[in-house]
Image (cartoon, helix red, strand yellow):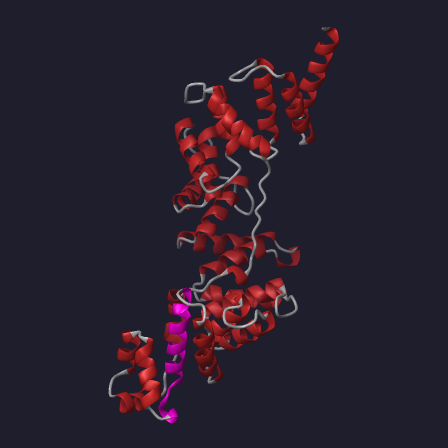
Amino acid sequence: MITKFKTVVIISACIIFVSISALAVAENNVVVSDQTDYAFCKNISLQNLIDKDAIEGYLEYVDKCPNGHITTEIYYLLGKNYYKRANIDTNNYKKAGYWLKRAGDLGHPKAQLLIGVMYENGFGYHKDNKKAFEWYKKSSQYNIPLSQLFLGIMYFEGRGIEKNVTEAIRWLEKASDNSVLKAKFILTLIYNEGDSSYGNPERALKLCSESAKLGFIESQYYLGTMYYLGITAKKDHNEAFRWFHKAAMAGNSDAQYFVGNMYFLGEGVKKNYQKAITWFLKSTEQNNEKPIYYLGYIYYAGLGVEKDYIEAKRWFEKASKKNNPLAQYYLAMMYVKGLGVQKDVKSAIKLLENSAKNGNKDAEFLLKEISINAQIN
């Protein structure tokens, strides 16, 4: 009953909102060479200032100390804190940009990363992919993992720079080596679904497995599809169910659909219609259209539940509006037979015509049968 699966992935750094906590990946790569000057000026350690985590404290330091003693780290901390406060007041993006630019111009790699994010998303600056690319490239030279990820994505998509898959792979591999799970996932897609000249199924399976085991939800779902369809990995429904279930438990709606479907069909797990219903409902709660028809059919056929034509009609109607040909067909059958509804041949014919247009041969046959019966009568 499952239609051919096709993975669709939108790889876009533009929709990635970098949290400050994510920057901790790069924290150990920053070297502050001016701590002695800072301690002399403020008479407290730089770490105390970081722990204080208050813009007012940084501003006090900047006001009291001569410019020659202000480290790039202080500029970065000021910018970072204004960036964090932008969810309260978006004007803070401009203040963040001012201080981050000062730190970035002096070579602070995490500041350069955040400037790139701000240019890419239009936070405090006019949106400019070319400038975002330039700042990511500066930051990447310092082995900042997230900058390597975003640089690789921009090379892959040709945003801010001419598309160059070879360079994309180079930077994504660097990010992958630095344990960026999203980089491993994107490389999986490139190696498994990209141009044949970049195909590397073994590497794709290895990277996908690594990131899936480390809890990256998209990789868990994708690994499930590999095992379910026998693409790259040997077909194994038990393994497919295991990875779909992990992703489903983490809230992935497509994985929830597959878990429901495997319970429905008894693939990789014992058939259980009640559990199928549970997972189908979880998936539909996230506006996933795929399970809607199956819910209708379960109530129509009374699989694991009492037959309930009212409930079946409700789900079939939802699926029919999404142009599901099977839902349109079974809803038409209900109108033909008067199951839970008044008999209505006109409504049935309209549904069957739509079902036939959507490729259902059974609908074409039933239309002919209705036409012949009408002529006889």
- 185 vs 25: above or below: above
Q: Main secondary structure of the magenta part?
A: helix
Residue 197 figure quarter: bottom right
Q: Is residue 272 visible?
A: no
Task: Residue 36 in the image: state x and y as whole percent.
Answer: 30, 90
Q: In this image, 51 relative to 86: left or right?
A: left
Q: In this image, 128 relative to 78: left or right?
A: right
Task: Residue 182 in the image: state x and y as whole percent.
Answer: 48, 59
- 333 vs 37: above or below: above
Q: Is residue 72 magenta?
A: yes
Q: Which residue sits at x=54%, y=68%?
A: 120
Q: In this image, 175 relative to 66: left or right?
A: right
Q: Is residue 75 magenta?
A: yes
- 204 vs 262: above or below: below
Task: Residue 9 in the image: state x and y as whole percent.
Answer: 56, 52
Q: Which residue sits at x=48%, y=33%?
A: 261
Q: For the N terminus, which image quadrant? A: top right
Task: Residue 333 in the image: state x and y as whole percent.
Answer: 59, 19
Magenta span covers which residues?
67-87
Residue 26 figure quarter: bottom left
